[in-house]
Image (cartoon, rainbow, N blue to C red):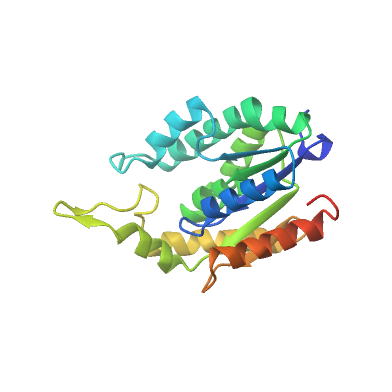
């Protein structure tokens, strides 16, 4: 099995810029699915496997300022390939609801649009290999103002200076603006797959209610 639409399970991804609340929503969804007695798996990118977590540490470490775009996109794809084969596909074959914080759309937004559109087709081609063509049934995109990403990255300081934010979060505001624009472009092109949920001025519980409403609308009777 290489595609989600051929699997017995259901593949749902959570997307959005750093600080958009994906992890909080993933945890709320995990609790909800458990309460409903639904067989599920929640994972994340980059990471989700022992090898993937090691790659994550390298990708996000601020000390690697010399990392070139090609290395970055290949590391993300390598991490994703391991996650798909080791975790996601087996869970789908077992009929589980799989929820992943980030998937290919993140690479398209961050490495494709964010680093420069000259990388867009390369990102897509690399990830076609990494995933074997696997696509989510539904993607919840949590939309956040790019300035909020910057505020989060610089919000923690110490005597040594600014310590908040990983290697990606520390990038310039223009980069994060391109990432958000890329996400919205993806959502506009695939409205049948994406549901865009604004996070501005909303409590996590309200965002969660909108997430569940989206799931129930797209998959009647399943949630």
Q: Residue at x 41, y 68 (%)?
A: 147
Q: Residue at x 67, y 33 (%)?
A: 88
Specify whether 11 is left or right of 205. right
User: Of all residues shown, which one is farthest toward the right?
Assistant: 221
Residue 155 spot, x, y in % from top left: 30, 61
Tally the numbered discs. Answer: 0
Q: Residue at x 67, y 65 (%)?
A: 210
Q: Is residue 80 above or below residue 16?
A: above
Specify whether 10 is left or right of 164. right
Regarding residue 172, the answer to whether it shows in the image is no
Residue sitting nearer the eye, 136 or 107: 136
User: Of all residues shown, which one is farthest toward the left?
Assistant: 159
Q: Residue at x 50, y 48 (%)?
A: 111
Regarding residue 214, the answer to whether it shows in the image is yes
User: Of all residues shown, which one is farthest toward the front?
Assistant: 35
Occupied quadrant, residue 63: top left
Residue sitting nearer the eye, 93 or 70: 93
Residue 4 spot, x, y in % from top left: 77, 38
Q: Is the N terminus in the top left, top right, bottom left or bottom right quadrant?
A: top right
Residue 110 spot, x, y in % from top left: 50, 51
Residue 85 spot, x, y in % from top left: 65, 26
Q: Is residue 50 above or below residue 123?
A: above
User: Of all residues shown, which one is farthest toward the bottom?
Assistant: 201
Specify whether 175 is left or right of 161. right
Residue sitting nearer the eye, 51 or 134: 51
């Amino acid at each position: 099995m290489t595609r989600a639409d051929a699997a017995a399970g259901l593949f749902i991804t959570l997307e959005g810029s750093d600080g958009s609340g994906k992890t909080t929503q993933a945890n709320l969804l995990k609790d909800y699915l458990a309460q409903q007695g639904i067989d599920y798996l929640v994972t994340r990118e980059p990471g989700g496997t022992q090898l993937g977590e090691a790659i994550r540490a390298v990708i996000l470490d601020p000390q690697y300022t010399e990392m070139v775009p090609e290395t970055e996109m290949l590391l993300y794809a390598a991490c994703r390939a391991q996650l798909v084969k080791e975790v996601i596909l087996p869970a789908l074959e077992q009929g589980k609801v799989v929820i992943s914080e980030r998937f290919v759309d993140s690479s398209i937004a961050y490495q494709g649009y964010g680093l420069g559109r000259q990388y867009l087709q390369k990102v897509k081609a690399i990830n076609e290999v990494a995933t074997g063509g696997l696509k989510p049934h539904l993607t919840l995109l949590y939309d956040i103002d790019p300035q909020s990403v910057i505020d989060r990255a610089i919000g923690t300081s110490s005597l040594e200076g600014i310590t908040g934010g990983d290697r990606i979060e520390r990038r310039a505001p223009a980069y994060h603006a391109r990432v958000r624009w890329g996400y919205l472009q993806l959502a506009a092109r695939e409205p049948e797959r994406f549901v865009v949920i604004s996070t501005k001025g909303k409590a996590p519980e309200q965002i969660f209610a909108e997430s569940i409403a989206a799931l129930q609308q797209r998959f009647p009777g399943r949630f």
